[in-house]
Image (cartoon, rainbow, N blue to C red):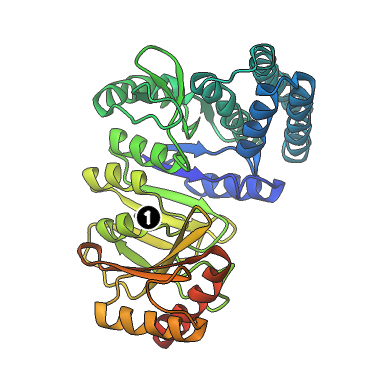
């Protein structure tokens, strides 16, 4: 059994779905659970619709959902070849959106959107993605069953940021997904779960990766692959620095630290279930499945400097990781000199976190890209 997670950045185009189909088909007769995220910017659009509805603009909010439906139908049309499959899928997608519009209409009437209701609205994106992914795999001849994550992931009732209840989830997973093994491939959605009281919950930002890791742990899977639109973890954000270097291997603890300090692709909650079960995770490029990507496991790993950023209240913390303190402070001094700032001023503040071997340089948001580039030049490019 393997778990394969496909992010919304991958599934936003027909090519992304074809990559998913190719990857799953290459697994042959190996049982697989596929976890999908909401496609593209769907989650943000749903949040916008809920906000608009809470101001009483119900028609405008429902128009937003109509547009979302049109986008998903267009994608389905490009992905599904069978006319019968397309008709069935169209009906399913329309049902999902109608349910969302009923919620949005209620929000507009009361001008209130509780966190409980917002979770139900936000779950719509993953429902749409799950249905298209299932239909596309079936259309390609893959033996596939669809399972709603609400039937397997059990959480507390902290709406918007619910935490999984491991034992209850493990029981549900083994009961429901063992039945699902009647099909070779099971498709479910990330991010979405269900409370002990049967209410829809969501588990926070980027928690589809948590879903994949949690399911793998409960199933005793051999591995988890997180498929993205980049070739694994790199020394910095490639949208800021053109010369980033690949990070091919991280220990669980290194991955947790990097995620905590804002490194893209990694999120703190996704690490623990895999670590607890001793399951290797791979972060890889869906368009280049044979690439190395980044492996996260329990083996000792050497990691050179990595740079991550976190934003808060118009300030950005540029975090330098896995760098000896003397080298980190020397690089911070270079940043201060080049920016023409002084330590402790409103422009820049340097903080160290010895327990995580991390140094943070806090600057005004617009200066952060320059800080990242200076640090990368001083510390990372010498490794190439």
Quadrant housing residue 47: top right
- The percent position of residue 214, horizontal first and vertical second, equals 34, 37
Image quarter (top left, top right, bottom left or bottom right) of the N terminus: top left
Image point 30% across, 58% down: which residue? 257
- The percent position of residue 135, horizontal first and vertical second, equals 64, 30
Q: Nearer the viewer, residue 52 or 32?
A: 52
Q: Is residue 355 above or below residue 333?
A: above
Image quarter (top left, top right, bottom left or bottom right) of the C terminus: bottom left
Asked if residue 347 shows in the view, the reply is yes
Number of marks in the image? 1
- The percent position of residue 357, horizontal first and vertical second, equals 25, 68
Image point 63% across, 40% down: which residue? 39
Q: Nearer the viewer, residue 231 or 67?
A: 67
Residue at which label 1 appears: 259
Left or right of 345 on screen, residue 14: right
Asked if residue 384 shows in the view, the reply is no
Q: Is residue 332 above or below residue 356?
A: below
Q: Secondary structure at mark 1?
A: helix
- The percent position of residue 175, horizontal first and vertical second, equals 33, 19
Left or right of 70 on screen, residue 102: left
Q: Is residue 120 above or below residue 205?
A: above
Residue placed furthest toward the front: 345
Q: Nearer the viewer, residue 13 or 82?
A: 13
Q: Is residue 184 above or below residue 13?
A: above
Quadrant housing residue 194: top left
Label 1: how many Cα within 10 Å (few below 14, some 14–19, many 20+): some
């Amino acid at each position: 059994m393997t778990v394969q997670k496909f992010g919304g950045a991958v599934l936003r185009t027909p090519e992304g779905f074809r990559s998913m189909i190719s990857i799953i088909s290459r697994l042959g007769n190996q049982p697989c659970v596929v976890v999908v995220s909401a496609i593209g910017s769907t989650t943000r659009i749903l949040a916008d619709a809920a906000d608009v509805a809470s101001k009483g603009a119900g028609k405008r909010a429902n128009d937003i959902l109509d547009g979302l439906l049109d986008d998903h139908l267009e994608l389905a049309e490009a992905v599904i070849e069978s006319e019968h499959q397309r008709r069935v899928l169209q009906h399913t997608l329309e049902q999902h959106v109608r349910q969302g519009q009923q919620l949005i209409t209620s929000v507009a009437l009361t001008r209130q959107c509780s966190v409980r209701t917002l979770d139900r609205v936000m779950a719509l994106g993953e429902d749409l993605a799950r249905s298209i992914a299932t239909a596309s795999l079936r259309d390609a001849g893959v033996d596939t069953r669809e399972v709603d994550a609400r039937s397997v992931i059990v959480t507390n009732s902290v709406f918007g940021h619910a935490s999984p209840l491991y034992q209850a989830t493990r029981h549900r997973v083994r009961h429901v997904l063992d039945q699902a093994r009647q099909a070779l491939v099971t498709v479910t959605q990330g991010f979405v779960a269900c409370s002990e009281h049967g209410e829809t919950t969501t588990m926070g930002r980027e928690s589809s990766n948590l879903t994949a890791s949690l399911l793998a742990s409960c199933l005793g899977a051999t591995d988890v692959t997180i498929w993205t639109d980049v070739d694994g973890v790199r020394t910095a954000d490639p949208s800021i620095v053109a010369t980033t270097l690949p990070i091919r291997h991280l220990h669980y603890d290194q991955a947790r630290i990097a995620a905590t300090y804002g490194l893209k692709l990694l999120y703190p909650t996704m690490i623990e279930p895999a670590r607890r079960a001793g399951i290797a995770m791979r972060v890889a490029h869906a368009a280049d499945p044979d690439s190395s990507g980044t492996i996260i496991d329990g083996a000792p790993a050497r990691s050179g400097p990595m740079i991550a950023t976190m934003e808060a209240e118009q300030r950005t913390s540029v975090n330098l990781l896995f760098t000896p303190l003397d080298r980190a402070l020397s690089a911070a001094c270079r940043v201060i000199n080049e920016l023409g700032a002084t330590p402790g001023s409103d422009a820049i503040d340097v903080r160290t976190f010895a327990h995580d071997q991390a140094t943070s340089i806090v600057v005004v948001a617009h200066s952060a890209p320059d800080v990242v580039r200076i640090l990368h030049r001083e510390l990372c490019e010498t490794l190439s």
